[in-house]
Image: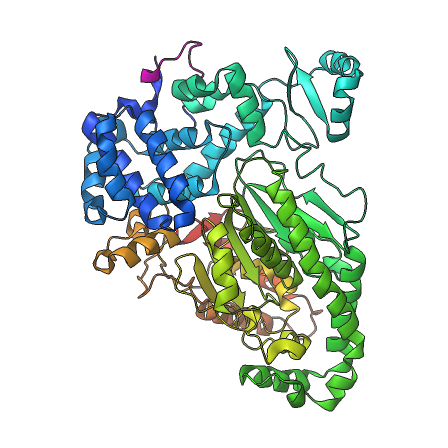
Amino acid sequence: MEEKQSKTHSDFSPGKEDHGPEDIISRQLSEQSRFAFAALCSVSLGQLFAGSENRVFREQYLQSLVQWLDLDESVMPVMGAFLSGLGFEGIDTFLSILQADPLVAAGATPIIQDLVSLSVKDGQYDARSRVLIRHVSCLLRVSPQQLEEFEETLGERLREAVEESEEESSRRRRRERGRKLRRYLLIGLATVGGGTVIGVTGGLAAPLVAAGAGAVLGAGGAAALGSTAGIAIMASLFGAAGAGLTGYKMNKCVGAIEEFEFRPMSSGKHLHLTIAVTGWLCSGKYNSFQAPWCSLGDCGDQYCLVWESRFLRDLGSAMTSLLDGLVSMMAQEALKYTVLSGIVTALTWPASLLAAASVIDNPWCVCLNRSAEVGKHLAQVLRSRQQGKRPVSLIGFSLGARVIYYCLQELASDKGSEGMVEDVVLLGAPVDGSEKSWEKMVKVVAGKIVNGYCRGDWLLGFLYRSSAAQLSVAGLQPINIQDRRIINVDLSSVVKGHLDYMRQMDTILVAVGVPTKEVPGASFVLPQTVKAAQTVVDDVEQQASATQNPSEEDRSCSEEGRDWSEVAETEETEDGWDIPDITDLLDSLNETESDNQNSIPNNSPPKNQETTKNNGLTEADQDEEHISWSWDDAQWTTERSHK
């Protein structure tokens, strides 16, 4: 087989039709390197997924990896020991052996791509597999961007290999008139070739033909997928059993739910996806479910959940009326300190505010109850694999975070729900923050659970006043659980009130570590003249290693990341857990904006901060720095855009 090996993902070319086992890229490593690669993955599996609920996954993945690498079965006892938590001190040795291999000399990207091929070859991309791949990629200095691009390219090749022509589509419709396939028409299934049923619906899944995988996976991947059974396997990966998320819509009310559907926010064809859940709707700029999420970056296929819009609009109007018309700014500042004091019982609230409570209490209570029902229904949708057998990340604010919370609680109540959810971000969540409730749901999340909270969010405290005396509220305080998956982020420097979770979403996404993209009019764009404090935080997976052996904390992926990402000088934090507080960063931004505003003549018409800032830039300042926190690489990175 003639195939170029490169640092990037783009040099994979279609292989020959007949592929033998020797064509698997990782098998071209020396025997010593193959053992080191398997050992590295085994130790990582033991660190990341130590719970009993993950035992079957750990053992099956290890068995598949040993076979994939063509290692002798005699290595299994040693690998099993690594899987049980031993061998941490040997990671440096395993890395040295791998990096000395000629195949990896130019970069470890090929074997990471091969690990992706192994993970999807059975038609299921387990969320735990992707977390493992991200962790091993970090250790081997393969950037998250390279992994993301390869996964996207792989997904596109698997799903676009054979597009239907108009004539083929016409023939397909005639064949489907038969009684046997009539029931499939409702969910958009189609026959291709010799009658194999695969997904083509809703723009979510194009026809899959395994032969197309050779262009991305290389010869080894094509060998694994290039069979009749492989077509059906890859179809299941993208959700061929149903119409996918785009085609999912309730035909009738389910319990107390009136509206529940998904709307796409991106046109990519990724191997993983993100579902964003909005907490309320307002008039004007934020009158749609998609509006708060316009700056989401590389998060796979992106969807927003459309749910109970009539009630969410009522809630948004009520909150706006309460803040803008019934409560003065001075009173809001006083209320903020009331919440910060930790005393949020009904007796501490001003009588005037309690008198106005009728404006908001009813829509809030209605949405509170419906969000719980919507969350449980979302769990049923994910459990039915409408999204395909791909990792799902969930992000939501306010009542949207409550939807996700109840979704995870529902998944946790059912065995076998592990491996669906990769990462979770909850912002200003009006949910119970006790250890007992969170310990249950973290088991179904493979990666991170970010709890973004604001200690001075008086509106959330007021709305939750009836139960705040008995419950700790996650949106007001950190979650005190010693688990590598829980990350608490204090957003008090960004969020001044509950409505800011929608208004400042661009900045919040940066603060909690979600990839973002530049959007005109976004709330977080720094001019080149602003010097932002640069902070390093270890990746969540790296923290798992630190908890196993604290003496090894200095060997962090953040140092390795400097080789493949342009970063400013950084410092290592003490615990490596919390995503950095960006107070200093925002102070610098505010100072710059104030200077720019003061420089405007008094007779100039008032403009928003974004316009003022842009007008204040000289021609030499047209290069902008965008400070963003990468979801995968745990680095503050500086990206320049040239205008």
The one nearer the camera, 292 or 119, is: 119
* Count of labels in the image: 0
At a point 22% along the width and 45% down the height, the residue shown is 91
Residue 398 visible in image: yes
- Magenta stretch holds residue 384: no
At a point 36% along the width and 49% down the height, the residue shown is 48
Decide whether the magenta segment is chiefly helix, strand or loop: loop
The one nearer the camera, 439 or 285, is: 439
At a point 59% along the width and 35% down the height, the residue shown is 388
Q: Is residue 616 above or below residue 154?
A: below
Q: Residue 584's x, y, as percent?
A: 44, 70
- Magenta stretch holds residue 17: yes
The one nearer the camera, 348 or 416, is: 416
Image quadrant assignment for residue 179: top right
Residue 143 visible in image: no
At a point 49% along the width and 35% down the height, the residue shown is 125
Side (left or right) of 131 relative to 277: left
Q: Quadrant of the N terminus?
A: top left
The one nearer the camera, 87 or 222, is: 87
Residue range in magenta is 14-22
Q: Is residue 357 above or below residue 608?
A: below
Q: Residue 205's x, y, as percent?
A: 63, 29
Colouring of the image: rainbow
Side (left or right) of 604 relative to 432: right
Q: Residue 409's x, y, as percent?
A: 57, 56
Q: Is residue 5 above or below residue 517?
A: above
